[in-house]
Image (cartoon, coloured by chain):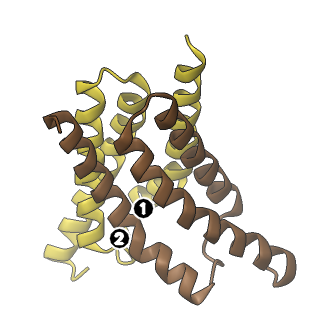
Chain colours: A brown, B yellow
Amino acid sequence: MSTTEILGYCAAFLTTASFLPQALLTLKTRDTSSLSLTMYSMFTTGVLLWLIYGIKKADNALIFANSITLFLSACILGFKVYNVMFKNG
Amino acid sequence: MSTTEILGYCAAFLTTASFLPQALLTLKTRDTSSLSLTMYSMFTTGVLLWLIYGIKKADNALIFANSITLFLSACILGFKVYNVMFKNG
């Protein structure tokens, strides 16, 4: 593994790990009232595009980081949409 | 510009734009009480590493997205450290 690849995996680990506690708390409590639907939809779409970009460039650090983040943020977005539709937020 | 590059810039635009409103609000109010110092330090370091990774790979979409995010998150981290040291949070 090259130095650049190690750097990419460290970056991936840090940004993903910093997103995890908040994401897991939201998934546990299912409280999405403090999230903006617009902003969260943009974020989730953005992460999806980063993942496709990583796949197209065969960049494993990008693929690794964005698959985990996409999975979590898509679940949270699902709860948000559900809450907006059935629970007023 | 190739399709992959356009995809990268769209991803960069979306994830950066979704981070902007919260970041600008935090910078405006300077209220960092709801931020975890550990998580935010990890995030800021992670974004810095993504930026260096982007520079090493000469990946303009990564450089673009992570320079803006690093600037904002470093300012927020600065306020957080200041608040923790002088204002109990």
Foreground of the two, A79 or B82: A79
Residue under label 1, please give it. Answer: B26
Q: Residue at x 55, y 80 (%)?
A: A26
Residue A52 screen position, x and y as percent: 56, 38
Amino acid type at image mark 1: Thr
Q: Secondary structure at mark 1?
A: helix
The reply to whether discs 1 and 2 touch (Cβ–Cβ < 8 Å) is yes
Height in image: A32 above or below A11? below
Q: Chain of mark 1?
A: B
Q: Chain of mark 2?
A: B
Q: Which mark is residue A24?
A: none
Q: Quadrant of residue A18?
A: bottom left
Spatial CA distance of label 1 from label 2 is: 7 Å
For this view, does A1 lie left or right of residue A39?
A: left
Residue A69 screen position, x and y as percent: 48, 59
Amino acid type at image mark 2: Thr
Q: Quadrant of residue B56?
A: top left
For this view, does B54 lie left or right of residue A64?
A: left
Residue A72 screen position, x and y as percent: 54, 67
Residue under label 2, please give it. Answer: B32
Residue B41 screen position, x and y as percent: 23, 62
For this view, does A51 lie left or right of residue B74?
A: right
The furthest residue to the bottom: A29
Height in image: A10 above or below B71? below
